[in-house]
Each structure stands twice: as structure tokens, then as C-alpha cells.
Image (cartoon, rainbow, N blue to C red):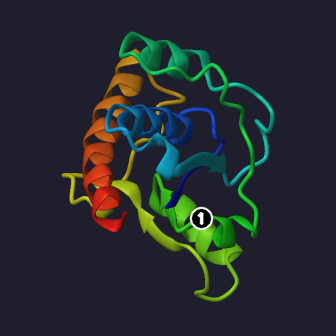
Amino acid sequence: MRVLFVCLGNICRSPTAEAVFRHKLEQAGLAGLVQVDSAGTGDWHVGKPADTRTRRAAQLRGYDMSALRGRQVEAADFQRFDLVLAMDHSNLDNLKRLRSGNQGAELDLFLRRYQLEVDEVPDPYYGGEQGFENVLDLIERASDALLVEVKGRL
């Protein structure tokens, strides 16, 4: 199975989801069976590491983001991945416009798919440190549910 997480710039939410889900796959002994990546719908941060506040918050919880670099989602991703999970409605709309037809990867909102109390992972970029903690809380919960789904598909 192949999963792609998508946010706007690929420096906060989607790389956090990638790191958290990779960690959960490793803990479950499934790392070799699932391909995980992240991307942004924008191109501002291509090749750059995740935001320092994102990396710091993740590191405090044991997630390593040091190797992750921003990239922009491309049309070929809809064929390379089985499941593309957007962090918010705006990025989901952008992904729907980028994908030609309904072929390829299944698209959904990450939190809505797993029926969390909110549909969107809020963008912490312009907020304080608590925003990054909130993002981690939401992503950890949704990643637990995604892990259950993945186990059912393998």
C-alpha cells in the first residue's frame, strides 16, 4: 500500500503526518509493506526541511523528521499512490483539480476519513507553539485509525 499526505507547503502538517505514520508502521512491524510520503500543493518550500517548530515538536514526541524535504505534489502521484490524504478542504480541492478524472488514488480528508471531531488539520504556521502540539495530537489519533485500515488491506 502507498499513502501520500498533502498540505499546502509540505513543511508542517503533511511531513508531520508522514513522520508519525512511519513511526507507527515501524512499531507495528509493517514499515516494509507500506510506502509513505508527503507533498505540498504549493512550490514555495521544495527541497527545504520541515519548519523548525514542527521538527522540534515532533522530536519531543520521538518522531524523526531530519531526512524529510519539501516537495510539490504532481499529477503522477495519483498513479503512484493508493491513498492521498489532504490536511484541509482547500488542499483537497486543489488535489481534485490536479487529478485528471477520477482515476488513480483515492482522495480524502485525513481527519474526516477517521471521523475525528474536526475535518481539517489546522495550519499551525502562523500560530504559537500550542498549534504544533495540537497538530501532533490530531495526526497521532488519525494515524492510529489509518494503521487499522492499512492492516485490513494488507
Q: x%, y% of residue 66?
A: 63, 19
Q: Is residue 104 above or below residue 80?
A: below
Nearest to the observer: residue 84 or residue 27: 27
| Residue shown at the point (42%, 40%) measured from the top left | 21
Q: x%, y% of residue 36?
A: 55, 48
User: Mark 1, residues whose alpha carbon is within 10 Å: few (<14), some, or many (≥20)?
Assistant: some
Nearest to the observer: residue 32 or residue 47: 32
| Residue shown at the point (70%, 84%) measured from the top left | 100
In this rendering, would 127 be left or right of 76?
A: left
Q: x%, y% of residue 65?
A: 57, 23
Q: x%, y% of residue 124?
A: 47, 31
Location of the C terminus by quadrant is bottom left
Give the image quarter of residue 110: bottom left
Q: Is residue 58 above or below residue 101?
A: above
Say what amino acid the circle numbered 1 marks: Phe
Q: Is residue 80 above or below residue 28?
A: below
Q: What residue does disc 1 label?
A: 81
- SS for tag 1? loop
| Residue shown at the point (67%, 73%) measured from the top left | 79
| Residue shown at the point (71%, 37%) measured from the top left | 70
In this rendering, would 45 be left or right of 96?
A: right
**How many marks overall?**
1
In this rendering, would 11 be left or right of 149?
A: right
Q: Residue furthest bottom?
A: 101
In this rendering, would 49 be left or right of 154?
A: right
Nearest to the observer: residue 152 or residue 97: 152
